[in-house]
Image (cartoon, rainbow, N blue to C red):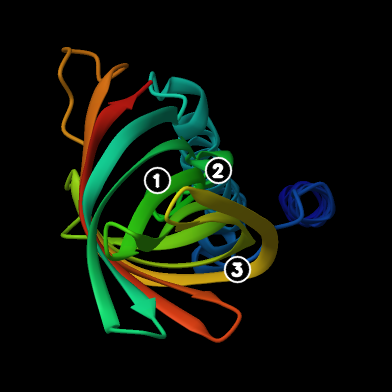
Amino acid sequence: MIRTLLAVTLAASMAAYAQSDDDAPIPYGDGEDSATETLKPKKAKKKRRAEEIREEDQEEKDGEETLASVDDPNIGIGGDIFMGVALLDSPRSGVDARYFFGLRFTWEFGRLIPDEYLREMFFMDVAWTYAASKEGTNQVNVDTHLHNFTLAPAFAIPFGNGSPVAIYGQLGLGFDYSYSVTKIDTQTVTLGGTKFLFQYGIGLRGRPAIVGDGSVRLQFRIEVTRFIRGYMHDMYFGGGLGLIF
């Protein structure tokens, strides 16, 4: 009887053990694989965040460059009065030194460029220059009047970033209207005409602000300009003073 009871008890225990093994949960793997799977989403999230930060920085930089032209209080339009000494080419005496003066309208078209440095490098002048020459004696003389009209773009290089002073080179085209009055005793003869004009030169240009926000600037220049009118070559040494708004 006792032997039979022990056998039944042993059989029941073995059946319960086998059933507990079948109901055991399926393992997910070792600890290293689980940690790797957990870190992957974190790395992807950090990578996306880094890309978002780079995109935000680039957008901010592009916005600053674009707003450089919007925030500038100076629109780059103005003019000046200039004068100096003209060495006029004369077929009779070689060089005829005369006083000259003129008016000049300036447009800083480089301000259309968003880049903060390049916008300071380009401008254009529309100018009128007048000089007169007189040769001969009291009885016989020739009085010549020269009017030069030119359109001349220029390329300037500032002395450092943000400097109001720059050196520039300039090329221009236009025409010369001149007329001469020839006097012989009491008789006078007037002749006039126009010629194609080519201009080139170099100079020093300053634009210091005279109000706090920079919306009004003083413009001054020291320059050497050469005009070619036909076979005549004239050289002008002068300076100008005006305003840029």
Q: Is residue 89 above or below residue 196?
A: below
In primary-sequence order, the first of circles 1 and 2 is 2
Q: Residue 157: which quarter of the image?
A: bottom left
Q: In terms of secondary structure, where does tag 3 sit?
A: strand
Residue 89 lies, in percent from the top left, at 37, 78
Residue 168 lies, in percent from the top left, at 32, 64
Foreground pick, 222 / 53:
222
For the residues carrying marks 1 and 2, which lies nearer the camera in this image?
Answer: 2
- Residue furthest to the top in view is 212
Q: Is residue 142 above or below residue 106?
A: below
Q: In terms of secondary structure, where does tag 1 sit?
A: loop
For the residues carrying marks 1 and 3, which lies nearer the camera in this image?
Answer: 3
Residue type at mark 3 is: Leu
Residue type at mark 2 is: Phe
Residue beneath disc 3: 197
Q: Which mark is residue 109?
A: 2
Residue beneath disc 1: 116
The quarter in which the C terminus is drawn is top left
Foreground pick, 11 / 78:
78
- Estimate how packed mark 3 is, as few (under 14), some (14 to 19) or many (20 or more) residues with alpha carbons within 10 Å: some
In primary-sequence order, the first of circles 3 and 2 is 2
Residue 36 lies, in percent from the top left, at 55, 64
What is the CA distance from the residue labelled 3 to the residue labelled 2? 23 Å
Residue type at mark 1 is: Glu
- Estimate how packed mark 1 is, as few (under 14), some (14 to 19) or many (20 or more) residues with alpha carbons within 10 Å: some
Q: Residue at x 39, y 23 (%)?
A: 74
- Estimate how packed mark 2 is, as few (under 14), some (14 to 19) or many (20 or more) residues with alpha carbons within 10 Å: some
Residue 148 visible in image:
no
